Amino acid sequence: MIDVEKIRQDFPMFKNHVKMHDHDLVYLDNNATTLKPQCVADAVYGYLTEYTSNAERGDYDLSHIVDTKFEGAREDVRRFIGAKDKREVIFTAGSTDSLNMVAYGYALHHLKEGDEILLSLAEHASNTLPWFDVAKMTGAKIKYIDLDEKGAITIENVKKAITDKTKIIALAIVTNVMGYVIPIHEITALAHKQNIVVVCDGAQSVPHIKTDVVADDIDFLAFSGHKMCGPTGIGVLYGKMALLEEMKPVRYGGGSNARYEADGELSLKSIPYRFESGTPNIEGVIGLGAAACYLESIGIENIHAYEIELRKYAIEKLKQVDKVELYNPEATGAIAMNIKGVFSQDASSLFNTYGIAVRAGNHCAKILKDFLHVNATVRASLYFYNTKEDIDTFVEVCKKGDDFLDAFFG
């Protein structure tokens, strides 16, 4: 599938970490952010040192270079997610920004009292809090699609939740804790028969599985660059052109308007520029384009297949450890677990003493506790540069359990 040892050479963090800390890095917090390959760093550095100027503003050579690179990155992202038209790709500050734009720019102007928004208990705060607020502002109601006994979304439970008042379904294609892939194609097919708009949080899916917004008939898709080997502070909102035409900007300023007059008359630029007010994160956009090309060079299908194999290996090992409690062994995304008798944040600190980076807490999915009946978990999330040796190191520490806790506190 992929040559992981060769791939690891693309990521300076591995050798630099050894230089700084005198031990290997076992990085298992990829749901939070991913490491960056040299080609992404080079792309960002190139903008900062070779052709710095503003985008979509100047009439000189440097500005033309930036415009070409900027729009080239938009095309790279369009190709990566399978969109028809690069104008449907809007650059944002990240998934949170993108989802807020849909909530306040589209839903706020289309929902009315009594309308229903369907979510799940497994959603990230970025895909709950904006909807809570918009529901309050419009009089719409929040309802939840039941999770099955494993913590997954099924098409049967989606059918049960939909009523004639349902107007929006907002779900993560892969949730950041439970890690199950939703049946997005079946959900959009069902929703569109009843004129329901489907909003997808793709933060944990776009970096790991093949995304095709046309084939899956997705209405809106949000994702972040830093979770797919790109820079932080850059993300994407994809929207069908017809829906973007109905969406209002949530920020106004330079770059978004064609003209405006003293009496308040305003003419907006065409899509996507009307949604990209102000100087954009130019180096972020260029770095994101480089990240998309890098992932394409490896093959997203190859990445997904390798991660499935690696996760299966991890689960088989962890199931042999009595002190480990697994919450989602059958998922494809992150591994949610706890070490029995050890508070999750304590466990995370203990793993750190062995050079292992994991995440602990509620992971911004603060209503998931109503399903899991635990307030916090340890989350180990994998990417294509992780190895079986990483898993072995992680599992050996898990085996220490209470003894490890006693040793840590002396």
Image (cartoon, rainbow, N blue to C red):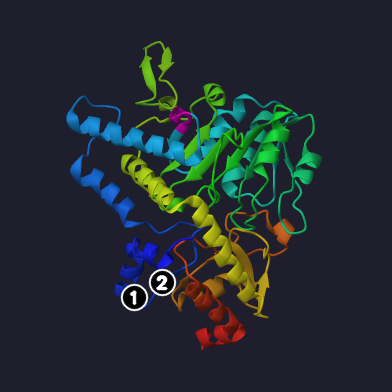
Check disc 2 and report the residue beneath it: 25
Three-letter amino acid code at the position of disc 2: Leu
Three-letter amino acid code at the position of disc 1: His
Check disc 1 and report the residue beneath it: 21
Q: Mark 2 and mark 1 in contact (Cβ < 8 Å)? A: yes
The magenta segment? 85-89
Give percent across and percent down for residue 325: 68, 72
- Answer with left or right where residue 132 lies relative to residue 92: right
Give percent across and percent down for residue 385: 44, 63
Please tell me the numbered disc located at residue 186. Answer: none
| Residue at image location 52% in from the left, 73% down from the top | 391
- Kindly report the distance in space between the C-alpha atoms of the residues bearing marks 1 and 2: 9 Å
Asked if residue 142 is positioned above or below residue 87 in the image, the reply reads below
| Residue at image location 33% in from the left, 51% down from the top | 40
- Answer with left or right where residue 136 lies relative to residue 296: right
| Residue at image location 67% in from the left, 65% down from the top | 329
Asked if residue 177 is positioned above or below residue 71 in the image, the reply reads below
Give percent across and percent down for residue 60: 18, 27
